[in-house]
Amino acid sequence: MSRWSVMMVVLMLSISSLAGELLPFRVGVLSGIHHAEHTYAAQLLEQSLSLHGYQMELISLPGKRLMSQLNRGEVDGDLLRSVDLSRGFESIIRVDEPMGSSCVSVYRLQARSDIVHGTEGQTPILAVYHGAPGASGFFSRYWPDTQLVHFSRLTQGVKMLTHERIDLIAVHDLDRHYLDALSDRLIQRYARVNLALDYFHINARHADLAEPLAATIKRLKQTLSPPKCQQGSRVLMSGETEYLDVSETAQGGP
């Protein structure tokens, strides 16, 4: 799209917004997702869409159904995805400005604190949720000395860790409270990473909106406060790892 076309789209939508005629924009979010970065992304997107003449409406849907409905145009957008849906669906476009990132911690059994990523002679087995290809790609790239395996449910992954079939497990930060409930052994948070991989996707009928919306999102990100793990940490944002105090355990931790 030419620069002139982008300016015209912004102008027309801005006029509509000023006239109070916000158009509905149905945005899907994965069922059961209530993480802090989703709240941040929803706030960011709602403000961005309003500047282009749209009123956001959030709809909770299962992951596969959300993708198919977006591709068919039954919903207008998908709030956060770590994979580029445009590569697999002909009617989905990725808005090329990251909405945020996922906060993931790596845990090990406290009784096995000798398991240290990057230690010569060790090849720790690390389990990652199979529905998070972005996380799998991150650990494959930055933790190449680990053996990557996958789990389908958190209960399965914690059971694997408890019975020492794996050495490490990567879990979303806000799911850490489940670890105590699912295991009868002390589980220790060992490291934390920040995956800057989440993007907003739209149906192709909104193709003219993709470029100006990306610019608006980029601008508004400078004014909104992101979740804690996204703030001011060069280590977390560069693909490196922050190693935590090994005395911190999931049980009784903050």
Image (cartoon, rainbow, N blue to C red):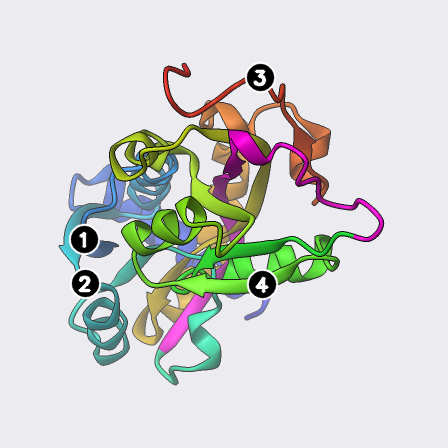
**Viewer can see residue 7:** no
Identify the residue under disc 3: 247
Q: Which of marks 3 and 2 is nearer the N terminus?
A: 2
Identify the residue under disc 2: 62
Q: Foreground mark, 1 or 4?
A: 4
Left or right side of 101 for 157: left
Q: Quadrant of the C terminus?
A: top left
Mark 4 is on which residue type? Leu
Residue 157 in percent (x, y) is at: 38, 53
Q: Quadrant of the N terminus?
A: bottom right
- Label disc, if present, on residue 31 of the rendered structure: 1
Left or right side of 217 for 73: left
Helix, strand or loop for disc 4: strand
* Total numbered badges shown on the rendered structure: 4
Mark 2 is on which residue type? Pro
- Label disc, if present, on residue 148 of the rendered structure: 4
The image shows residue 148, relative to residue 194, as above or below, that is below
Q: Give the range drawn in magenta.
A: 92-121
Helix, strand or loop for disc 3: loop
Mark 1 is on which residue type? Ser
Cα distance in 3D space between marks 3 and 1: 35 Å
